[in-house]
Image (cartoon, rainbow, N blue to C red):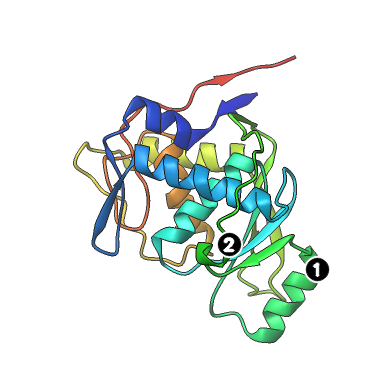
Amino acid sequence: MKLDDWLAQRSQSCPDRTALLAEGAAVTYAELEAEATWVARRLAAHGVRRGSVAALTMHAHREQVVLAHALMKIGATLLPLSPRLTAAERAAVIAAEEPIVDLDDAGELTQTEADLPLLGEHDMDDVCARVLTSGSSGSPRPVGLSYGNFLWNAVGSAFNIGVQPDDRWLCCVPLSHIAGLGIVMRSSSTAPPPSSTMASTSTASPPRSRRTG
């Protein structure tokens, strides 16, 4: 089953709606789409390609939300890392996962852009992110989460919690945790509220999907 790119769809269905409130500034879906597209092309210039792993230190900044969406436009796998990891913990993860880039901020990228076609859709089973476990029963280890995992998390949240037009998602947990990253994903993938703090949101309908084969 194929899914249209979530952010691209939101930028078409509700371009002027607030997608993100962070650091005292509001960003619309159209603005977030344009910025993510620009960053995606800069990531591609650094060699990021579909299926490659990109490590990203998930500070609580809008740039991390933009980078997460940019990686999806390429089809790369996000490896979100906590800024609280020790140097040894971080080095162990990087050595095991061998990401093609290891970023703290989009500002580390050059201004060069690659003219690489960006993805307009994703397969439900494609891995979107590899999130570290809590490490409560041993060393933290990355677990792959597919686009389908994030989509059904969003759908389940909408059905069980309910969403009102004037609601906002408040992301008060680190974006390196599944609970934090899940807010970013569900905010563009299904039918959440019109704006949020540190996460994009929307009242648009769920993304179109279609079977292939």
Q: Quadrant of the N terminus?
A: top right
Q: Is residue 112 left or right of residue 197?
A: right
Local SS, label 1: helix
Q: Earlier in the sequence, mark 1 or mark 2?
A: 1
> Is 211 located above or below residue 13 in the figure?
above
Local SS, label 2: loop
Q: Is residue 71 left or right of residue 160?
A: right
Residue for badge 1:
96
- The residue under the point 58% across, 29% down is 120
Of residues 63 and 201, the one nearer the viewer is 63
Of residues 140 and 66, the one nearer the viewer is 66
Occupied quadrant, residue 119: top right
Identify which amino acid the numbered label 2 is placed on: Leu
User: In whole angstroms, how far apart are the C-alphas of marks 1 and 2?
Assistant: 23 Å
- The residue under the point 28% across, 38% down is 163
Residue 173 is situated, as x and y percent measured from the top left of the image, at 42, 66
Identify which amino acid the numbered label 1 is placed on: Ala
Occupied quadrant, residue 86: bottom right
Occupied quadrant, residue 103: bottom right
Q: Which label number is shown at residue 109?
A: 2
* Labels 1, 2: front one: 2
